[in-house]
Amino acid sequence: MTTWSQIYDPMGSILISALVAALPVATMLVALAFLRMQAHWAALAALGVAIAVAVVIFGMPADIAWRAAALGAASGLFPIGWIVLNIIFLYRLTVANGSFKVMQDSIAGVTADRRLQLLLIAFAFGAFFEGASGFGTPVAVTGAVLIGLGFSPLAASGLSLIANTAPVAYGALGSPLIALSAVTGLDLYQLSAMVGRQLPFFSLLVPFWLIWAFAGFRGMLGVWPAVLVTGVSFAIPQFLVSNYIGPFLVDVIAALVSMACLVLFLQVWRPATVWTSTTLSGRVDNSADDLPSRATATDGAPVFKGAVWQAWMPWVILCACVFAWGTADVKAWLNGLYMVNLPIPGLHQMITKVPPVVAAPTTEAATFLFNILSMTGTGILLAAFLGALASGTNPLAFVKQYVQTIWVVRKSLLTIAAMLGLGFLTRYSGLDATMGLAFAATGFLYPLFGTMLGWLGVALTGSDTASNVLFGGLQKISAQQLGLSPILMAAANSSGGVMGKMIDAQSIVVASTATGWYGKEGVILRYVFFHSIALAVLVGLLVMLQAYVYPFTSLVVGG
């Protein structure tokens, strides 16, 4: 069979072609933010527009387009949907048996202040899960914990998304940078070091930004010493590990150090005023009515230590399982037990990427990897099972709760499938490359716009890894053509991409599902959009300084 070569400028103007290529994304954003459609309908509408644009305008054969969308849908359910389903199941189990309430009170025992709880859970605890597994796990876990602590659905969802930014480039034991190195041929450790000279600035900034978004500027000033301790104790290990060890354990080590430093600091310091609000400062947050605010401190009746340990057991097991599932040895062993890598007929090696997106024509692989044993979601399911055993949950209740969870998250799973279908179609049709070429035409401003390209990639695909695969080669080629450091611009793709994580539909659906705020994805998107684009622009400005201005140029790895 004859392969189809991607067409990047069907309109004869790269700007117009890019605007046409952006129609599916614009459809989704308008449907969510302005038409207030439910996320699954918005995603399906965007997918329909993408198929029409790819086939009618960009000349992609219709049968190949449908196969690309189907592969994306399957890849969305496994592993992303599998993670969401099982983490929500674990959360619902702990709520049903009462252990989550005990755990919630034990966290309040560390600090009753909502701002400090955010630092501990959304930022530091979430960074640990990002480093160990990524792919939606941190937002699902922290969103569920925050909603259990009494945060409003909007606060729990939006703030979990804002917090899950600075650690993303090193998520899943360095997967985004490993993929970036693979597609660009650039040295993995130089990429790790370069990202490690960009993101620590934001690891320091994001905790302040997070508390400002929740409590306002004055509310943030009330706990600035704790915020500073949290940020510094994360940023320094992030820099050191990324530059002198490698990308694999950056988030895990930095998160553990940050959590330990914050907890120890709170033993000797307390804010002058304890913040007990669970809604966002300075706004009418009607979502607060959806959940009653729980007690913000212990009521004088201490919880028995054994009960606290038993309540934390499922989450301790979860940490152990997620970490184990993220290691190469465990993955290899589980994949050896069962793994199917199925080439998709009519799609595999049927599409050719051509210059200038790649240096030479390259056919695209299209396989569906079904390695369910080594998927992080399976580790989460095992943690739920072991936690249920430890708490004495009845097996019938276990199965009944799982069936109920499937029903609860059904629309979220459909949304994830549709969104990944859109992402895969965007990649295989070349729509992403067309938008990337438009960014690459910005010349002197390319360090800024190249960073925003990484942001766009994650917003489209929901994954820093996928964004690096999509645009890593383009960043390298464009940097070489403009006389910039390929290491700098490839790293900028990943660093800029992390700020797109909070607005991609996949993450928003995970957040709304974890907090039980179904059908409110548009509200969450409108809340986080400013934070996402503002932080991405700041990353871009830092990259501009690193490209052109001394002493920032001295931070560039590999020239």
Image (spheres, helix red, strand yellow):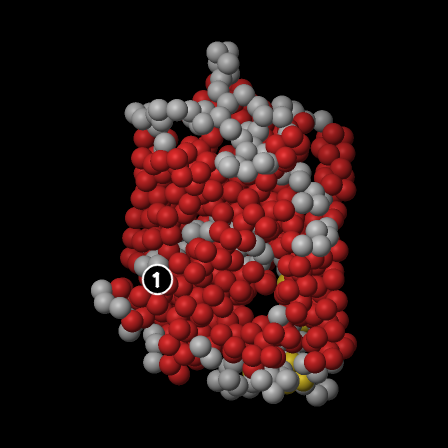
Q: In which quadrant of the rendered view does residue 192 lie? A: bottom left
Q: Is mark 1 on a helix, strand or loop?
A: helix
Outermost residue toward the top?
Answer: 301
Q: Which of 145 and 395 is in front in this view?
A: 145
Number of marks: 1
47, above or below 185, in the image: above
Residue 442 seen by the camera: yes
Query: Could you say where residue 252 lies in the image, as x and y percent from the top left?
Result: 41, 46
| Residue beneath the point at 69% across and 57% down | 31
| Residue beneath the point at 40% across and 60% down | 539
Query: Could you say where residue 20 lies in the image, as x and y percent from the top left?
Result: 64, 75
Specify whether 231 is left or right of 513: left
Query: Could you say where residue 104 lies in the image, as x and y percent from the top left?
Result: 53, 26
| Residue beneath the point at 65% across and 30% down | 289
6, above or below 138, in the image: below
Within 10 Å of disc 1 (Cα), the crowding (few <14, some 14-19, many 20+) is: many
Specify whether 176 is left or right of 523: left
Question: Hey, what amino acid is under mark 1?
Answer: Leu
Residue 84 seen by the camera: no
Residue identifier under label 1: 542
Q: Nearer the viewer, residue 288 or 163?
A: 288
| Residue beneath the point at 43% across and 41% down | 212
Query: Could you say where residue 523 lies in the image, as x and y percent from the top left?
Result: 63, 47
Image quarter where the N terminus lies is bottom right
Image quarter where the C terminus lies is bottom left
Specify whether 475 is left or right of 521: left
